[in-house]
Amino acid sequence: MTMVAAAGLAVSAQPASAASHRPCGVDKHSNLAGVEKVGTATAAIGADGVKLTTSRTVDTDKVSWKTRFLLPVAADSVNEMNYETVKLDTYVDDTNQTVNNAALPSYHIYVRTRAGAEATLVYEPYYNLPSNPQRNVRTEWDVTTGKLWTSATTLNGVTGVGGGSYATNKTLAQIIATNPGLTVTGIGWGLGTYNRGVVAILDDQRFATKLTCTDHQWSTGFSTGIFWPGWLF
């Protein structure tokens, strides 16, 4: 059964409006296949997404997931990228440094230049907000018009301090403008490193072009054949 994300139930915490949703095929994940964990980071499937955590005592924890497309797609054909998160950890004074109050799981976009060079573009909610994200609120993030960073040095116009674009975050459209022929080879998500004490839920990672659309969802409900997302209750 094809499901449509209920945009009206999501809260947009960033200035840009979330993309309008259209009917989209759902890739159902009822287990942690493809999820990679480093250190003491954890991942667990729940009724309304995948719950991710990192340690309060080390900076090296990391948890991530990615999927590669059978065929790359033209980056300029992408017209919808978004996902939903809930930040569940408890606020701790920044001087304590046991909880990163800004951090949430990030949306990853794997790209390739016309010359064949690879790079990963990263969307982090913090870079698209005037302050730390809200807690205990299911929030939809519009990645399509959001600012992205990369640690790669293979893209024109987005290389910043230390070889990364942290100082010059750009939207996908801006990156395409300086890298004609750019293609997207896959998507994913990640949490870590230097994100201590984060507890968050991630779900509904959508990616759409002018011709195709997919929505990755994680839920224990898929294993029983009945899906009741937690935010319905």
Image (cartoon, helix red, strand yellow):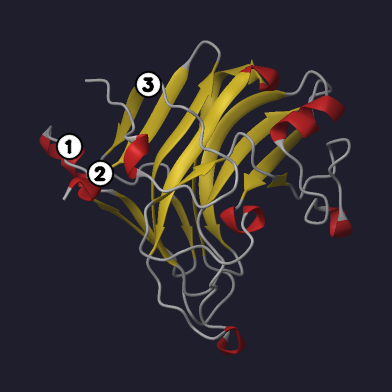
Q: Earlier in the sequence, mark 1 or mark 3?
A: 3
Check if mark 1's residue and mark 2's residue have beta carbons within 8 Å: yes
Q: Looking at the picture, how far across and down is residue 184, in whole percent?
A: 64, 26
Under circle 1, the secondary element is loop
Q: Nearer the viewer, residue 128 or 222?
A: 128
Q: Earlier in the sequence, mark 1 or mark 2?
A: 2
Report crowding for label 1: few under 14, some 14 to 19, many 20 or more residues within 10 A (C-alpha): some
Q: Please tell me which residue is depicted at 19% across the width and 37% down the height of the picture.
A: 222
Question: What count of labels does the image hold?
Answer: 3
* Type of amino acid at the residue the image marks with label 2: Ser
Q: Residue furthest bottom?
A: 96
| Residue 161 against residue 202 in the figure, above or below | below
Under circle 3, the secondary element is loop
Q: The N terminus appears in which quarter of the rendering?
A: top left
Q: Looking at the picture, how far across and down is residue 59, in whole percent?
A: 59, 74
Q: Quadrant of residue 113?
A: top right
Q: Please tell me which residue is depicted at 79% across the width and 25% down the height of the picture.
A: 116
Q: Which residue is mark 3?
A: 24
* Type of amino acid at the residue the image marks with label 1: Phe
Residue 39 visible in the current orientation: yes
Q: Residue furthest top?
A: 211
Q: Please tell me which residue is depicted at 82% across the width and 50% down the height of the picture.
A: 168
**Can you tell which mark lies on residue 227?**
1
| Residue 3 horizontal side relative to residue 24, left or right | left
Q: Which residue is mark 2?
A: 219
